[in-house]
């Protein structure tokens, strides 16, 4: 089974002014209407907005969640067979609180998405599309990562069995040990994610520079690039990035390993698999390799930011028995990632 994943930034901003011919495609030119207000979403909001952002770990009944959910469905409307089989995930920390409200939302089964395609079409305008769900489910994010590792052909071991998975997301970091029988609940944890790093970097930078009211999502983009421009001066962020990432690992990630995993757990495991967008920072990968050097292999999964979404896709396919209308939807705090059948 071959899959295809695509993504857009999980940010939006109310739309004002002219937006014609500002993007090359639907994915980069999303303009949707929710509760009577037009919003720029994803790349379009980052490029044409002033302060594009969102609420972290938004509840399913909040505006932030609805905008990103409908934007993701819109991008599947012309490429995935209908009605959809869909699986979404929630962080371990919010799963119990948000699962039932999210299921109640999905139980509507029928959704209408109003959008404007003038952003990328010369003869575009206001359009409306109806979406129907055939089947749906909500599972923990860490379970999605485990399914993605086992079924997505994303790791060097063709048949991964006992392993530890660590997911480094923007809002939360998750971890746990997977065996043939399932997750070992004693080992599962949820901790502060990469937002912790961004906020600490912002505090440190604010001592020396006026950041011109950059929000955390804008600063996160700068950390990824390794520099920022402030008052027409280029500021190198590589040293402070290494410092805050190292401290994040030592103060957040490593203590959770010591609290939740025993030597016997490490004996049973064949590898530690690292997933999530946070592990794209080399400084974090180096910290894992240093701590576990010599007694347990550490592997960054292929396309680590997509792993949970790939797992959701495989779970969705198991619900309806078909891959052609299945969708794995990961509404993350940094990016919204969608996985579909490659031939869909």
Image: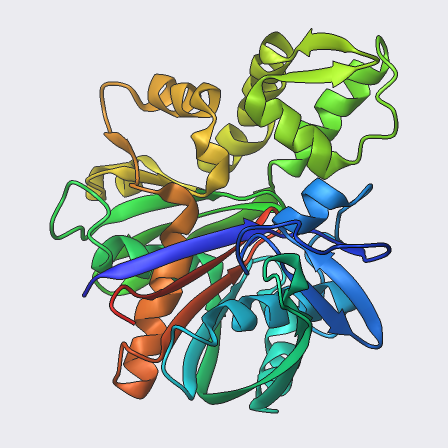
Does residue 261 sit above or below 81 in this rendering?
A: above
Task: Name the residue rendered at 28%, 33% in the picture.
Answer: 299
Residue 189 position in % (x across, y down): 51, 49
Residue 187 position in % (x across, y down): 42, 50
Task: Name the residue rendered at 58%, 84% in the picture.
Answer: 106
Residue 151 position in % (x across, y down): 22, 60
Q: Quadrant of residue 279?
A: top left
* Towards the viewer: 61 or 268: 61
Task: Name the residue rendered at 87%, 30% in the picture.
Answer: 213
Q: Quadrant of residue 35?
A: bottom right
Please identify the quadrant where the C terminus is shown: bottom left
* Towards the viewer: 131 or 106: 131
Residue 165 position in % (x across, y down): 36, 45
- Tell me if residue 326 can be seen: yes
- Tell me if residue 259 can be seen: no
Residue lying furthest left in this view?
A: 158
* Towards the viewer: 152 or 129: 129
Does residue 248 sit above or below 133 in this rendering?
A: above
Apparent side of residue 200 relative to residue 316 in the rendered image (left or right): right
Q: Quadrant of residue 286?
A: top left
Please identify the quadrant where the N terminus is shown: bottom left
Residue lying furthest front in this view?
A: 123
Does residue 122 sit above or below 74 in this rendering?
A: above
Apparent side of residue 15 relative to residue 101 in the rendered image (left or right): right
Does residue 184 sit above or below 105 in this rendering?
A: above
Number of labels in the image equals: 0
* Towards the viewer: 72 or 175: 72
């Amino acid at each position: 089974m071959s899959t295809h994943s695509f993504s857009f930034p999980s940010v939006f901003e109310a739309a004002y002014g002219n937006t014609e011919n500002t993007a090359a495609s639907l994915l980069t030119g999303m303009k949707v209407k929710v509760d009577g207000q037009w919003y720029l979403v994803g790349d379009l909001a980052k490029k044409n907005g002033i302060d594009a952002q969102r609420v972290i770990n938004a509840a399913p009944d909040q505006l932030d969640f609805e905008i990103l959910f409908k934007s993701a469905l819109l991008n599947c409307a012309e490429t995935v067979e209908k009605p959809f089989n869909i699986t979404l995930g929630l962080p371990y920390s919010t799963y119990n609180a948000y699962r039932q409200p999210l299921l109640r939302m999905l139980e509507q089964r029928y959704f209408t998405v109003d959008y404007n395609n003038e952003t990328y079409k010369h003869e575009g305008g206001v359009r409306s599309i109806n979406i129907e769900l055939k089947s749906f489910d909500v599972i923990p994010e860490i379970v999605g990562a485990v399914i993605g590792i086992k079924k997505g052909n994303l790791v060097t071991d063709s048949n991964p069995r006992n392993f530890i998975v660590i997911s480094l997301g923007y809002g939360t970091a998750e971890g746990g040990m997977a065996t043939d029988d399932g997750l070992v609940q004693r080992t599962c944890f949820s901790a502060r994610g990469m937002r912790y790093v961004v906020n600490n970097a912002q505090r440190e930078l604010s001592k020396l520079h006026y950041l011109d009211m950059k929000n955390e999502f804008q600063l996160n983009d700068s950390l990824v690039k390794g520099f920022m421009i402030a008052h027409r001066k280029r500021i190198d962020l590589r040293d402070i990035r290494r410092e805050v990432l190292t401290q994040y690992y030592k103060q957040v990630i490593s203590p959770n390993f010591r609290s939740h995993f025993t030597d016997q757990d490490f004996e049973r495991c064949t590898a530690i698999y690292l997933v999530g967008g946070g592990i794209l920072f080399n400084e974090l990968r180096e910290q894992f390799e240093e701590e576990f050097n010599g007694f347990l292999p550490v592997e960054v999964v292929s396309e680590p930011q997509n792993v949970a979404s790939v797992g959701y896709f495989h779970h969705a396919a198991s619900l309806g028995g078909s891959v052609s209308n299945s969708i794995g939807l990961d509404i993350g705090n940094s990016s919204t990632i969608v996985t579909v059948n490659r031939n869909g």
